[in-house]
Amino acid sequence: MTQTEDHDTIGFIGLGNMGAPMCDCLLEAGFAVVAFDLDQTKVEHAVAGGALAATSAADCAAQADVLLTSLPRPEHVEAVMETGGALAALRAGSLWVDLTIVRTAMPASPKQRSRCATGRLAGHWRRRRCPQRPAHPFHWRR
């Protein structure tokens, strides 16, 4: 496993229908990924691809320079980030990117708090093609 140019570690929470292929793509591209999901078999799949397993959402966030969440609903994001302690575990200067499909009126509290907890902006990323998946829309590289 290799790390990104800036030695960023990507934390990935939520390895479901959308998250697993995105995580796989990051691993195929050589990014260092720490993965967490409630379903241990999904974490094992990510580990087989080169990821490190986190013991909890908070553990995943604590190890990440860039944290990606791909969860089913806004309530799950709130549960993971607030109740699960992931937001509090983010280090200063880390970045949280929520990939969850949300309804138009998402509860703003975790996102508002994250402005204080994180120090970089997602706008600093540029799009890059993913190896073996040339048109994959979910691969971003710093």
Image (tube, helix red, strand yellow):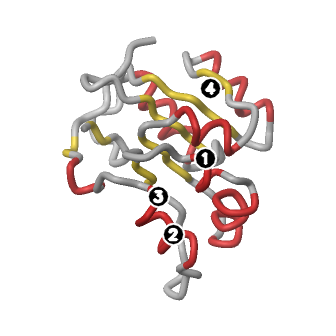
**What's under tag 3, amino acid-wise?**
Ala
Q: Residue at x 30, y 42 (%)?
A: 140
Viewed as shown, does residue 85 lie left or right of 120? right
Helix or strand or loop: what does disc 3 sit on?
Answer: helix
**What's under tag 1, amino acid-wise?**
Ala
Viewed as shown, does residue 97 lie left or right of 72? left
Q: Which mark is residue 117?
A: 3
> Which residue is denoted by mark 2 in the rendering?
113
The residue closer to the viewer here, 35 or 61, is: 61
Q: Residue 52 occupies which quadrant of the picture?
A: top right
Q: Residue at x 48, y 58 (%)?
A: 99
Crowding at mark 4 (Cα within 10 Å: few <14, some 14-19, many 20+): many
In the picture shown, does residue 119 fall above or below 45?
below
Q: Earlier in the sequence, mark 4 or mark 1?
A: 4
The residue closer to the viewer here, 56 or 16, is: 56
Viewed as shown, does residue 84 lie left or right of 111? right
Crowding at mark 3 (Cα within 10 Å: few <14, some 14-19, many 20+): some
Q: Quadrant of the C terminus?
A: top left
Q: Residues under labels 1 and 2: Cα distance?
A: 13 Å
Helix or strand or loop: what does disc 2 sit on?
Answer: helix
Q: Which mark is residue 89?
A: 1
Q: Which mark is residue 103?
A: none
* Residue 45: percent from left, percent from top: 67, 25
**What's under tag 2, amino acid-wise?**
Arg
Helix or strand or loop: what does disc 4 sit on?
Answer: helix
> Which residue is denoted by mark 4 in the rendering?
46
